[in-house]
Image (tube, helix red, strand yellow):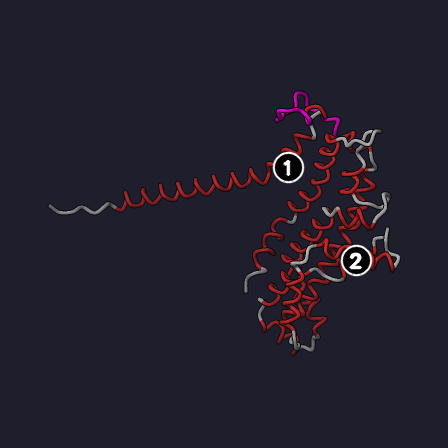
Amino acid sequence: MTATSPSPKSSASAAGVKVRVNRLVLYTVLVVITGLFLGPFGWLVVSGLKTQAELASSPVRWLPEHIQWHNFTDAFHQIDFLGYARNSLVIALVYATLVTLSSAWVGFGFARLNAPGKKTLFGVLLGSMMLPQLVTLLPTYLIFAELGMVDTYWPWVLWGLSSAPYLVFLFRQFFAGLPRELEEAAIVDGCGYTRMFWRIFLPQSWPVVSASFIIAFTWTWGDYIAPQLLLSSDRTTLAVAIMSAYNTPAGQPVPELQAAASVMYVVPILLIFLVAQRGFVAGMSTSGLK
């Protein structure tokens, strides 16, 4: 008897089935992970459409009996929603812009300049990423209080000018991967490092700039502790107002209005990410490549 080898047609068919099975498994895993990430936001939206009794009911009511669309309008009009949103937007834009530029400048120095102790300083910078914000917040508050900067936006300006370690790391990794010939050609043409940064390196780093801006904007837009500590009720941000301003005359929180306001609070971040999604993903993927 002679052994018969499988025909090319059957081998191709088996390979096609294997590819389809692998794709089905991959898509199933991705759908499950997406559901896990979107689940809390979906529950927040549903909570914003319930009554207070439905939110407090036991066992849990998964869906509202009658959709309460007026929760969103009530949440918008009960407080100065646009005023608090404007405060958050100003702080987030100022901080995100300044910290992106300052982090890019520091990352450029670590990537392209040679100086004694550069590696040690970079290690100290990375080590500072392990310090939680609460450790440094109280000393920072005391410094700002002594300088008379409490209840102003100057703390976020100074924080932005001081750069952020994680963003410095992103820019350093990106700039270190650019060809050395760019720097050498610029030096031959009489270009100094300052002009080299603004005219050559920064324009090529737009993916990282986009990622850095979105990360910094999200940090500041979602920050609760620093505005609560440094700003008065008139200058405070939307995050603080949502947690403290929706109360009954007896001082009890109104959870359905807080949930509806939280949905409106998250929408700007989602829009910014959707608009700059390609640059954000490209920046995060290219910063770690040589």
Dividing the picture into quarters, in which one does residue 149 lie? bottom right
Alpha-carbon distance for marks 1 and 2? Answer: 33 Å
Label 2: how many Cα within 10 Å (few below 14, some 14–19, many 20+): some
Dividing the picture into quarters, in which one does residue 71 lie? top right
Q: Position of residue 227 (x, y in %)?
A: 79, 48
Q: Position of residue 189 (x, y in %)?
A: 67, 77
Q: Is residue 282 above or below residue 62?
A: below
Look at 64% across and 68% down and name the residue there.
122
Q: Is residue 207 above or below residue 260?
A: below
| Residue located farthest toward the top when viewing the structure as drawn | 65
Dividing the picture into quarters, in which one does residue 101 lie? bottom right
Q: Which residues are magenta?
A: 55-72
Along the line of sight, the residue nearer the viewer: 218 or 286: 218
Q: Position of residue 280 (x, y in %)?
A: 62, 52
Reading the image, the residue beneath label 2 is 140
Look at 80% across and 32% down and name the residue there.
247
Q: Amino acid at mark 1?
A: Phe
| Residue located farthest toward the left when viewing the structure as drawn | 1
Q: Position of residue 56 (x, y in %)?
A: 69, 26
Q: Earlier in the sequence, mark 1 or mark 2?
A: 1
Asked if residue 46 lies left or right of residue 35, the reply is right
Q: Amino acid at mark 2?
A: Thr
Asked if residue 83 lies left or right of residue 193, the reply is right
Q: Is residue 70 magenta?
A: yes
Which label belongs to residue 41? Answer: 1
Q: Secondary structure at mark 2?
A: helix
Look at 63% across and 57% down and name the residue there.
207
